[in-house]
Image: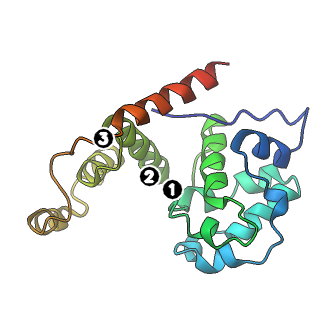
Amino acid sequence: MELTVLKLDLSERSFAEQIQKQLQVDVRECYQCGRCTAGCPVAYAMDAAPHLIMRGIQLEQLDWVLARNTYWICASCITCSTRCPCEVDIARVMDGLREIALARDIQPSERTVKVFHQVFLQLVRLTGRMYEAGLVGLYNLRSGHLLDSADLALPMITKGKISPIPKRFAGQDEVERIFERVAALEEE
């Protein structure tokens, strides 16, 4: 399952304007303080720091931005967004960039990043929240890494860190409605 929220038509407005319209995030407010990058727990693995991605969008460098691995590696932990003094929701922009890349069939440098993204969304849609055991199992199956982290499963289950069976989430119906609204928006 893939969700494509952003449909860019750069003939009518700039990249930054379309990000603002579609995601309600004005990246033009970023003044490059670097707090997002300083707080990012995975910045070391990115080929362009989060603040540089924001700058690339500001400078209309769509091809350069989409060629980076930054938005694929982003853990969506929201540290960058909470640290931003201008309240730019950088994590939301990273999510949007992943969707743009998927819509344009841009493949991440690591094939398994796309697999993780798809499995994550599928499980959130099915269970209404993150189901860790299902994420690891389905990811391992689809990525071809069948036994990765298998040695961690039993200790985590016995210590109550993860549940082998997903629990019903009270807001699961609302999450499903969100996915349905996104699908309806895509059809427009």
Q: Residue furthest left?
A: 158
> Measured along the vertical axis of the image, is residue 25 above or below residue 188?
below
Q: Nearer the viewer, mark 1 or mark 3?
A: 3
Rendered residue at 31%/39% (across/down): 127
> Measured along the vertical axis of the image, is residue 184 above or below residue 143?
above
Rendered residue at 23%/53% (across/down): 133
Name the amino acid, label 2: Thr
Q: Residue 182: which quarter of the image?
A: top right
**Mark 2–mark 1 distance (CA, rounded to whole Å):** 5 Å
Q: Upstream in the sequence, badge 1 or badge 3?
A: 1
Question: Residue 173: where, in percent of width, then height?
Answer: 36, 31
Residue 69 visible within the image: no
Q: Residue 17: which quarter of the image?
A: top right
Question: Residue 56: where, in percent of width, then height?
Answer: 81, 60
Q: Nearer the viewer, residue 117 or 29?
A: 29
The colour style of the image is: rainbow
- Asked whether the beta carbons under mark 2 and mark 1 sit within 8 Å of each other, the answer is yes
Name the amino acid, label 3: Ala
Q: Which residue is mark 3?
A: 170
Secondary structure beneath label 3: loop
Q: Is residue 143 left or right of residue 82?
A: left
Rendered residue at 82%/32% (across/down): 9
Q: Which residue is mark 1?
A: 110
How busy is the neighbourhood of tag 2: few (under 14 within 10 Å), some, or many (20 plus)?
some
How busy is the neighbourhood of tag 3: few (under 14 within 10 Å), some, or many (20 plus)?
few
| Image quarter in which the C terminus is found | top right
**Mark 3–mark 2 distance (CA, rounded to whole Å):** 31 Å
Q: Upstream in the sequence, badge 3 or badge 2?
A: 2
How busy is the neighbourhood of tag 1: few (under 14 within 10 Å), some, or many (20 plus)?
few
Q: Which residue is mark 2?
A: 112
